[in-house]
Image: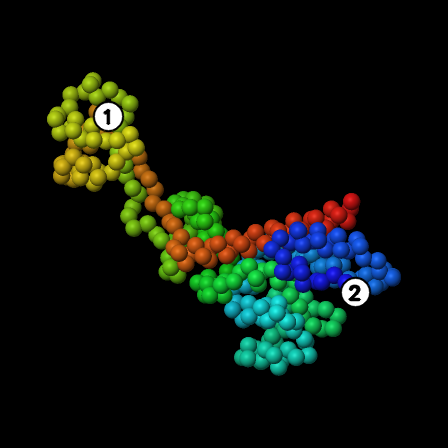
Amino acid sequence: MINYRIAGEKCDLAEALRTLDIECRKCIPLTPLECITRCDFWRLKNELRKLRGVMEKSNFMKELFNTLKNETRLQILKAIVNDGHSAGKRGHDFREVECMDGKSSIYDEYLQSLAAVGLAAENMNQRFYATVFGCILAKRLDGFADLIRFLPANSECYEETLLTSLLQGPKTFKNLASLVSPNIAPRILKRLKTAGLIEPPEEKDYVSFFRSKRDPEKETLSIVERKVYNAIPECGISARKLSEKTGVSLRRIYVHLRRLKGKKLVFIRRTPKTYRLTTKGLKLASLLRKLQELVEEIWKSSEQLDNSKNA
């Protein structure tokens, strides 16, 4: 028989499926019913096909994020990954985490939530177990429970969207607002700043001065104007650094730059202020990215099964 848990222990699910498929082809069951009732690989393939149906929902990632942003659910998932959970022992094993109002049992409040996004399932013996998706997720998202308190529960997951986008590097407000909405972006950024997940810009847009292509010999320049003009590098420079470089006061620098600009020898380029991840934000964003990559991996594996079925 094939070991069902091997898939959850493999880092590469596609490779695990290929290994299991080879073993499956060598297996010679006495009857087809034996294959269906006893073969773990058959159950794994069936589980992945069902999971693909769940993942096809347009709001699947939002539901998955919101399900995981609950410390109790993560604890229960870890528990059933390590050892299945019997429905008959439900009250005894987890009574300390049952809802205080007495109306919603742990079955409805937590286990069903995990099952709804494909992290857990219930077998014919009324025993909950972690799916291959749940097993791999629990192993890869180590440390996620320590960071979920910084994210709002049951949200539209705008915070997660901005955090993962910042993994590519610092972004301007305009870039970030285009991912959500300009109306709500300030509120989301403020929330991330308060949680210590992003570093907001301390200053306004950074202004640099550059030389134009116009020939300075065609203009009449004072000694100081020429000194300021010659001190401007090709890559541009700020007024403050130009003041330090030339020894001219900052106030006078602006006067001379204004004159040079009027003679079309200098132009201004603004570098927009950007937001970046903090160390804590980088860790959380990386975990969120791993989760997205895992979903993509599971999806591709389910496609692989469909292709092998149709072959």
Q: Is residue 235 above or below residue 41?
A: above
Residue at the location (66% across, 71% down)? 84
Which residue is depicted at the point 50% across and 60% down?
155
Query: At x 16% / y 26%, what residue is drawn?
Result: 226
Which dot marks residue 265? 1
- Observer-side mark, 2 or 1, equals 2
Q: Is residue 67 visible?
A: yes
Bin the neighbour count of mark 1 within 10 Å (Cα to Cα): few under 14, some 14-19, many 20 and up: some
Q: Residue 237 or 136: which is nearer the viewer?
A: 136
Residue placed furthest toward the right: 31
Say above or below: 98 vs 195. below
Check the image and tell me how it is coloured: rainbow
Instruction: Specify the quadrant that holds the C terminus.
Output: top right
Identify the residue position indicated by label 2 in the image.
Answer: 38
| Left or right of 71, for residue 113 | right
Which x, y percent locates residue 57?
63, 54
Question: Residue type at mark 1?
Answer: Leu
SS at badge 2? helix
Percent x, y for residue 286?
48, 54
Image quarter of residue 246: top left
The answer to whether one can see residue 53 in this image is no
Locate residue 223, reporting x and y percent: 12, 26
Q: CA distance from mark 2 to mark 1?
A: 82 Å
Labelled disc at residue 105:
none
Task: Determine whether 229 is above or below 11 in the image.
Answer: above
Where residue 211 sits in the image (x, y, percent)? Answer: 26, 28
Relative side of 181 to 229, left or right = right
| Residue drawn at point x = 38 percent, y = 55 percent | 278
Task: Establish if 118 lies above or below 79.
Answer: above
Which badge, 2 or 1, is on the more N-terminal residue?
A: 2
